[in-house]
Image: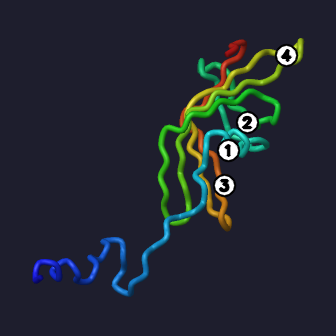
């Protein structure tokens, strides 16, 4: 009978359980996805330079109707913010008399928590450059 009672002691304490018995709840906010980033950058601008090193720097403003493809390379949370490094490719929708422009490279995006959602706060150009006359 002694061997039956030996397993009836108090349940082991989880390493996640605090001394006051409160178990922390995981962050329920959804992660920032590549599709969300593609939407969040619309209307935002970033300083870009010519990939060939020949043209002047200019501001690229992401338009709602342009092609965009995002691949998340890394992300890191700290102090209510989320830093995400992405590789993005986009291009303009040229009129018949305009040059085709492609912009691609790495961007660092800073997201901040607003209630239960993450909002894009800043875009930093790491090596996002444009090429004239290049299509995808």
Q: Are marks 2 and 3 in contact (CB under 8 Å)?
A: no
Q: Secondary structure at mark 3?
A: strand
Q: Residues within 10 Å of mark 3 (few under 14, many from 20)?
A: some
Q: Are marks 4 and 2 in contact (CB under 8 Å)?
A: no
Which residue, given by chain and number where applicable, does mark 2 sit on? 59
Q: Nearer the viewer, mark 1 or mark 3?
A: 1
Q: Which badge, 4 or 3, is on the more N-terminal residue?
A: 4
Which residue, given by chain and number where applicable, does mark 1 sit on? 36
Q: Nearer the viewer, mark 2 or mark 3?
A: 3
Q: Which badge, 2 or 1, is on the more N-terminal residue?
A: 1
Distance, label 1 to label 3, CA atoms, is 14 Å
Vertical position of residue 2 compared to residue 55: above or below: below
Vertical position of residue 130 compared to residue 33: above or below: above
Q: Which badge, 2 or 3, is on the more N-terminal residue?
A: 2
- The image quarter containing residue 81 is bottom right
| Residue sitting nearer the eye, 89 or 71 | 71
- Image quarter where the N terminus lies is bottom left
Task: Name the side, left or right, on which 22 lies relative to 30.
Answer: left
Q: Residues within 10 Å of mark 1 (few under 14, many from 20)?
A: some
Q: Secondary structure at mark 1?
A: helix
Distance, label 1 to label 4, CA atoms, is 29 Å
Q: Which badge, 1 or 4, is on the more N-terminal residue?
A: 1
Where residue 64 sits in the image (x, y, percent)?
81, 36
Distance, label 2 to label 1, CA atoms, is 22 Å
Q: Going 43% across and 76% down the picture, which residue do you hit?
A: 23
Q: Nearer the viewer, mark 4 or mark 3?
A: 3
Which residue, given by chain and number where applicable, does mark 3 sit on? 121
Q: Going 85% across and 16% down the picture, which residue do you hit?
A: 98
Where residue 56 sits in the image (x, y, percent)?
69, 27
Task: Name the side, left or right, on which 88 lies relative to 41.
Answer: left
Q: Residues within 10 Å of mark 4 (few under 14, many from 20)?
A: few
Which residue, given by chain and number where applicable, does mark 4 sit on? 98
């Amino acid at each position: 009978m002694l061997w039956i009672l030996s397993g009836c002691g108090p349940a082991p304490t989880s390493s996640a359980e605090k001394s006051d018995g409160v178990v922390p709840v995981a962050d329920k906010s959804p992660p920032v996805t590549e599709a969300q980033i593609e939407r969040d950058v619309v209307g935002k601008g970033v300083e870009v330079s010519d990939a060939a090193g020949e043209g002047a720097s200019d501001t690229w403003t992401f338009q709602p109707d342009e092609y965009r493809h995002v691949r998340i390379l890394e992300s890191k949370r700290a102090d209510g913010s989320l830093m995400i490094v992405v590789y993005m490719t986009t291009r303009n929708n040229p009129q018949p008399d305009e040059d085709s422009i492609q912009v691609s490279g790495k961007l660092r995006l800073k997201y901040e928590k607003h209630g239960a959602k993450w909002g894009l706060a800043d875009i930093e150009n790491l090596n996002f450059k444009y090429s004239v006359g290049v299509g995808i």
